[in-house]
Amino acid sequence: MLVVENLVKNYGELAAVDDVSFEAGAGTVFGLLGPNGAGKSTAINCISGLLTPTAGRIAVNGHDVVKDGKAARASLGIVPQELALYEDLPAIENLRYWGKAYGLRGKALVDRVATVLETIGLADRAKDVPKEFSGGMKRRLNFGCGVVHEPKVLLLDEPTVGVDPQSRAKLFELVEAARAGGACVLYTTHYMEEAERLCDSLAIIDHGRIIAEGTVAELKSQLGARDALQLTGHFPAEATDRAVEALGADIGDLELLSRAEDSLLLTLSNASRHLPGIFAAISNAGGNVTETSLRSPNLETLFLLLTGKELRE
Amino acid sequence: MSFLIASVKKDLARWARDRAAMLIWLGIPFLIGGMITSMMDGGGAGPTATLLITDEDHSFVSGFVAGAYGQEQMADLFLVEQVSAEEGKRRIDDGEASGHLTIPEGFQDALLNETPVTLTLKTNPAQTILPGIIEDVTEVLLDLGFYAQRLFGPEIEAIQGAIEEDGASDAFTAGISVDIQNKFETIGAKLDPLILELEIVEPPPEEPQPDYALLFLPGIILMAVLFSSGSLAADYWVERDKGTLRRLVSAPGALAGFVTGKAVAAAIVMGTVVTVTLVVGFAYHGVAWSKFVPSLLWVTLGGVGLFAWFSALQMLFPNGRVANIVTTVLLFPLMMAGGSFFPFAALPEWIANIGRLAPNGFIVDRMGVELTSATAWAIDAKSWLTAFAITASGLVLSALRLKTGFARR
């Protein structure tokens, strides 16, 4: 349904997207995860035809986005991060307008708009203007405008930014409904918990490159049962390395991922049990710990382990 | 077509909520037009000089001089009042008149006897033009009196004598008239030796000349069109910031309908502004209503052309604020050069020729032709085609800019 092969998008010397490939099928949600500036939106813009790729191939529902752009775009629906609504037009007029933009006419348009209004829970506010809506209601209408023409491939670009928990839950239901309806959903986010909840498979992207890809279960398995232990403080270089090496002899799966003068990142199983020994070893090495962060295995931990930095930095 | 109509409705519904802008666009021509009309027309009546005359001679000749200011065309220029010396002095000192002429006692005798005499003309220093006119006319009248004395001295003396005795009898009047007629014929033969062959040509019927304030009308209306087209063009930035353009560009085949729809909506808005201003302008200046439709179509088409090019221009800038500043800064030289502040007829020809090359100047110039021509639909086909081509190219450029990156944030 959605095929991205060796996608490259350069801005001068800067590679915003660098050799990205993935596939997503009908009735699935594919997550594209990464921090701000990782290249997610650039990839989405290439898929939606807003940007011309420097290299690579994108096919939507079998149509090449560059060579057969009109047919490809006819199968696409977009829910942009911003609220792409006409706030002075009633909700129903917004849906009708975007339905017409995608070629819906007559009874098909009327029926489809009515269905979408029901689905997004705004049937009773159809004639009200969005500027009178709450943020969550606007988000739902924004989603409705993206799916009014029943797209085969739906692009969701960080749709839950700035959304309250209740509206977020409603949006999740809408995404799941789209998947159940057979749509291929590409979902970009930097919230790992959203990806874990919604995505059948996902790719983690950083600096324009995919650094991990698979199902949620597959990605978690890369971590095994190890926790991520991040320490902040003062860590003398050679003494700390020797201390960690000595600890490794006692703790079988301890691994030093990164060390700087003021931070230390370790992975190990049952980290909480080994904390006293770790603190003692660092203290003996002449260092000190001012802050400790312990994370159980999840996608966020994986990102930390893969990149050495927080997902939301 | 369905999406085009939806786009038109969408923009009209959005813009209709901005009533303040519409009122400002409408207010501009009325404000400027009102100021110019009040300056140019001044209520429609020409300036009149109030001339106070104190006739201390009470003679036939002094009465003739005093009456001469009220004859034929001079009656439009002078309001003559006979006053006493005291009243005349008081009123001219109070600035209530343009001039005070005193004809001294013995004026007629002096004229007939060719002895020196002094007429006193006191003028109002607060006025600049009208007292000068009084002086010039008085000098001409005195020259005329000198020649009349040379030609008709005896007759004038006889008339004065008859008046002083018991009034002129019919026989006297007939006799003196024949004498004067004979002198005219004698003099006429000397003055008109018919050396020149004269051909009397019937002048062509003059077209009614438009009043000067009418020449401002196209420029004033274009001022409103410029402001409205510039403001409406900024709507592309509004849509871009909302993200609707991004969604639009992702929809297949919707771009042409979107751009055309915006242009049609702009045409309806500007057409409304132009209709109101034209109705008032036509009614006030008495322009033939047969010229209304071509004028409305022409200015509206020009307005859409300006909107299209302003749109394309705005989309070249890095953000909406810069785009708005540049557009606003551009408006004033355009108005200055394009005949909005001064009609082309009032400018030196070389400046007017440059102004006509400005996009708004082109529209103003042709509309001026339409308004001042003898018949309606006076704008030539080439001008219409040029305006269509410019408008279409502006719309195409706008669409291309949308397609090539403007829509994405």
Image (cartoon, coloured by chain):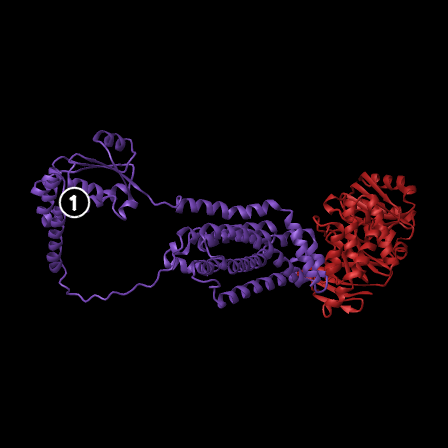
Residue depicted at x 15% and y 64%: B194
Identity, as a three-letter code, of the amino acid under mark 1 = Leu
Q: Which residue is mark 1?
A: B142
Query: If the image is split into quadrants, where does the C terminus of chain B sit?
Result: bottom right
Q: Position of residue B129 (x, y in %)?
A: 28, 43
SS at mark 1 in the image: helix
Q: Residue furthest bottom?
A: A67
Q: Position of residue B405 (x, y in %)?
A: 65, 60
Is residue A12 in sight in this rendering?
no
Q: Quadrant of residue A214?
A: bottom right
Residue depicted at x 92% and y 47%: A250
User: How many badges with numbers are in the image?
Assistant: 1
Q: Nearer the viewer, residue A294 or B208?
A: B208
Rendered colour, chain B: purple
Q: Nearer the viewer, residue A28 or B293?
A: B293
Q: Position of residue A261 (x, y in %)?
A: 76, 44
Q: Position of residue A98 (x, y in %)?
A: 74, 57
Q: Nearer the viewer, residue A49 or A307?
A: A49
User: How many residues crowd around disc 1 within 10 Å: few (fewer than 14), some, or many (20 or more)?
Assistant: some
- Residue B237 lies left or right of residue A98; in this view the side is left
Query: If the image is split into quadrants, where does the N terminus of chain B sit?
Result: bottom right
Rendered colour, chain A: red
- Compared with A171, A15 (above or below) is below
Is residue A221 in sight in this rendering?
yes
Q: Nearer the viewer, residue A148 or B388?
A: B388
Query: Callout 1: residue from which chain?
Result: B
